[in-house]
């Protein structure tokens, strides 16, 4: 796999806003390659939404789909920071692409409102707060609604929370207001293979989180403290976006748990339960009434 170092760099020893089940898949898929053990085959398919189905194809990589003055900004698959919007063909969406689409929606006077179509278990921390703030700014200017088809977890939920309202299907899940990171300790495997890695460094923290030594307790505690700081910022941002519906205390009290359907509404994480295919018609009617 020629791009494995780049992918591994995005996944290990870096904070992620990712549902733990997704993190487990990543660990099982990449862990054996890092450790040099037999690979475990992990199969998976793309899972994308229903709302945009009748609306045609994208015009280009940064333009949102549009129907009768309503734009659809797709937030689907693994979320990464930089690059063109690459979407369904690769199972990834970039924060740069989301911001670009939000800019177009706000600047286009013919677009009356926007649907955030969210189906994501999360992704990178880097860039997500900027993207979420941009979507929140858009929501102050034009009506927005997040439609889950069917998942909005971790970074995906942070982006969904920037909408004025969140609609979740009966089977949908949302939440996971927390941060996760993964570290691989190869020291036992190296010793078994008769290998010893000598790390030459200048600066006591230069080799923190390297995979060739067991993780020192001091480094572990420092990293956990930084992850908790990010969780606090995550929860505070969501609470600000959903003012009056979800408090900071309630967001933190979820302890990064996820909630399904009506339970998500009761917890203040979503506003209504409905089938995604119904939302476009209802949202369009609401916009027409507001204009009238």
Image (cartoon, grey):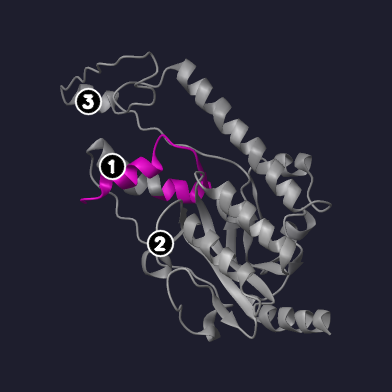
Residue that mark 3 sits on? 190
Q: Nearer the viewer, residue 60 or 54?
A: 60
Label 1 to label 3: alpha-carbon separation: 14 Å
Residue that mark 1 sits on? 32
Please report the residue visible at 77 percent of the width from the left and 39 percent of the height from the top: 249
Please report the residue visible at 74 percent of the width from the left and 61 percent of the height from the top: 140
Classify 10 Å Cα crowding around label 1: few (below 14), some (14-19), many (20 and above). few
Instruction: Quadrant for residue 102, please give it.
Output: bottom right
Which dot, 2 or 3, sits closer to the camera?
A: 2
Residue that mark 2 sits on? 84
Lower position in the chain sequence, tag 2 or tag 3:
2
Magenta-colored span: 1-25
Label 2 to label 3: alpha-carbon separation: 39 Å
**Does 68 lie within the magenta span?**
no
Residue 5 placement, left or right of 126: left
Please report the residue visible at 53 percent of the width from the left and 82 percent of the height from the top: 53
**Residue occupying the far left of the picture:** 194
């Amino acid at each position: 796999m020629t791009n494995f170092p780049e992918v591994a760099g995005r996944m290990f020893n870096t904070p992620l806003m990712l549902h733990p089940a997704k993190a487990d898949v990543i660990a099982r898929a990449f862990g054996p390659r890092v450790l040099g053990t037999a690979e475990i085959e992990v199969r998976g398919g793309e899972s994308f939404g229903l709302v945009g189905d009748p609306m045609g194809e994208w015009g280009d990589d940064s333009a949102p789909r549009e129907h009768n003055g309503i734009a659809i900004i797709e937030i689907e698959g693994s979320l990464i920071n930089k690059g063109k919007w690459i979407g369904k063909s690769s199972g990834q969406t970039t924060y740069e692409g989301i911001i670009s689409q939000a800019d177009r929606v706000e600047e286009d006077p013919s677009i009356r409102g926007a649907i955030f179509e969210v189906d994501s278990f999360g992704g990178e921390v880097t860039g997500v707060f900027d993207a979420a703030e941009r979507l929140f700014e858009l929501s102050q200017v034009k009506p927005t609604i997040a439609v889950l088809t069917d998942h909005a977890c971790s970074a995906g939920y942070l982006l969904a929370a920037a909408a004025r309202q969140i609609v979740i299907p009966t089977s949908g899940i949302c939440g996971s207001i927390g941060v996760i990171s993964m570290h691989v300790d190869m020291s036992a495997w190296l010793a078994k293979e008769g290998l010893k890695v000598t790390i030459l460094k200048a600066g006591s923290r230069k080799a923190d989180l390297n995979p060739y030594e067991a993780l020192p307790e001091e480094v572990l505690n420092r990293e956990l403290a930084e992850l908790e700081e990010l969780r606090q910022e995550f929860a505070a941002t969501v609470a600000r976006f959903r003012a009056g519906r979800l408090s900071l205390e309630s967001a933190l009290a979820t302890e990064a748990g996820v909630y399904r359907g009506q339970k998500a509404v009761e917890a203040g994480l979503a506003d209504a339960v409905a089938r995604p295919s119904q939302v476009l018609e209802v949202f369009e009617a609401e916009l027409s009434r507001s204009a009238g």
